[in-house]
Structure formats: structure tokens, C-alpha cells
Image (cartoon, helix red, strand yellow):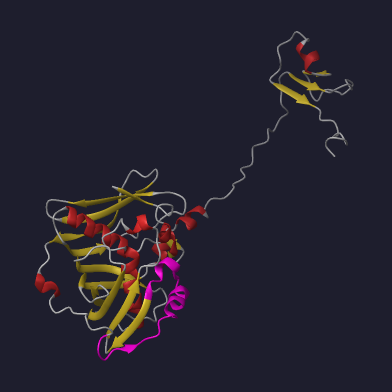
Amino acid sequence: YKRQSLERHPWLAEHVVHGAVLVPATVLAELALWAAHKAGCDVVEELTLQTPLVLSRTAEREIRVLVDGKRVVSVHSRGEGETEWTRNAVGVVGRDTPAAHAGEDLAVWPPAGAVSVPFEDEYTRLSALGISHGPLLRGLTEVWRRDDTLFAQVELPALDGADRARFHLHPALLHAALLPIGLGHFVDTSRPEGWLPSRCTGLRLHATRPTALRVRLAPAGDNTLSVTLADPSGAPVGGLTSLTLRPADVEQLTELGFDHQDSLFQVDWVPLPIPSSPATGRSAVLAGPDTSTPPLNQGQAVFANLTELAADGEEIPPLVIARIDPPCTVCCG
């Protein structure tokens, strides 16, 4: 069990998708990979993202990661006061094989024949689609293109040192490695809602806690690409056999967004019913020095103050009306 909140991981607040503070898919991938290692495995063979993991700006969310006897891994979450768990991702873990990443070599850098690609406007383009990235998620430093393949260089922005040590591969670094997707021909970038990761296969990690990466993004099918990761010397770090994307579900994210939920609260003035007949029963009026004030109805007595009312000898009535004199001009203005 773990807990996630914007207080524990402030950098998560920098990923806002259509108004919702959405935990990046790379966080769920890291959790699944962490669970795989705990279960004696070293690869997430398949991971499908289901319900988006959205955080409140004020409350924590409890996270549960499970690996069962059939090596099925699942990531669940629930908020404060919730009794049921929401499944955010499910997949299968297993053992890695050398054939899964044979021939992956990024030692020559930048790759021969690759042409530099401007990327600075990509953050602006994504923001216009409703997908915003704060400074701690802007780790992209260089991008190159060769045919349909993209190459990128990313660095982990300055984060709190303790936060870095929590992860085998920091999700902010892997997230930066995926940012160039919109600069390639992997998906239809004209769609107004933008794209988000949906499913991955062959997630593996050979080295732990890198702070910079060389990245290769290559086509691997419809709306799908492969991801190869290496350290700054070109030594393999890991990667994804395939990563499939789908259009962002704006309606679902809007529904899950806590800011939207909070905005549904409003003041509701409920009128009280007025009795059709005058009130009956004994009551009293505290009229101050002017005891000539006439009673409002039968059974109502008039007294100068509470002392006089208490000295009346009768039981204090359930309704006592006090006259409020004009405010004092000295102390009340």
C-alpha cells in the first residue's frame, strides 16, 4: 500500500489534462514494474490502463498494487471515505528474455542521418489541447528525426532528492521521453482532445535511477510505437516493446476532476412554512422600561426585563420576545 497526494509528490500537480490533475501513465507503469520486481519478475509483459487516476488538490489517495499467483498485476486506488477500490490498471508480469531487446544500440549519438527537430512549441500545442505540463515535467532537451523514427534526449529536472530515490525509473523522466510523440507520425495530431497512453507491452528496466536518457521512438502499428531507452553513454536502460495510445476521454476526465465536483456544491435556501393561523399558547414580551407595549395575542404577558419575568412566579413560557432598542451611537456607530 502507498499513498499519493500533491503534498507528497508536488510535481504531480503539473500534469493537468482537461482540468483534472491526472497522474501520468508512467507512474502506474513504475508501480507495476516495482511490483514485478517484488514478485521475482523483471518485465511487465502487458499493462492496460483503465480508470484514470485523478488526484484531489487537498486530499490523499490510497494506492494498492497486487500481483497474484498467476502473475496478474493490478493497480487500485481509493480516496478518503471511500470503501470500494477503483482499478486503474491491470496486466501481467513475467521474465525478460534477451531476444526482446536484441539489436537495440544507441551508442552513436545523435544517430547517423538524423535531422534536428524543433520541439519548444510542443508544450504550447499540448496546452492548447488541454494537456498542460509544468516545469518539472519539461525534461525534453533535444529531438531528431530519421524517416519515421524519432530520437530524443531527456533529463530529469531538479526534484527533491528523497523523491528521486523512491523510483527505479522516475516517472517524470519516462514521461519526458514520451513527449516527442506529437512530433512524429504515430497518431493523428489533428484530433482536438489529444492522446494519452492506453496499453503497453514488454515494459523492462535494466538500470535503476537514471537521471538522463537517450530515447528512440519507432512506429509499431496503428497508434502504436516502440520505446528504446539508453543512458547517456548508450548503454541499454530498458524500454517498451509497444505503447498504444487512445484519444483522451474528456467527458470522463471532467467527471473525475475534483475541482469540477467541488463546483457542484452551492447554497440552497429552503423556505420555511408560515403557519396559517396565529400562534397560541403562553408567551412573554420583554419591553424594557416601556411596559405599556400591548400584547400581540391573548395569553401574552409584558415584562420590563428577565428579572421581572422570573419574579412572576409562573413557569417561563416557551416563547420570549425581546425588544431591541436602537443601537448606541457611541459603541455601535
Quadrant in the picture for the C terminus: top right
Position above or below: 297 against 114: above
Q: Is residue 113 magenta?
A: yes
Residue 115 within the segment the image draws in magenta: yes
Q: Given the current orientation, which residue lies at the most extreme top position? A: 313
Measuring from the top left, give residue 196's x and y in whole percent. 34, 70
Is any part of residue 223 visible from this angle?
Answer: no
On the image, the x and y values in percent for residue 142 come to 36, 80
Q: Position of residue 93 (x, y in %)?
A: 16, 60
Is residue 246 shown left or right of residue 69? right
Towards the viewer: 207 or 238: 207
**Nearer to me, 282 or 143:** 143
- Which residue is at the far front? 233
Instruction: Please state which of residues 204 and 193 is positioned toward the viewer in this rendering.
Output: 204
Give the residue at x 31% y 63%. 170
The segment highlighted magenta reads 111-140
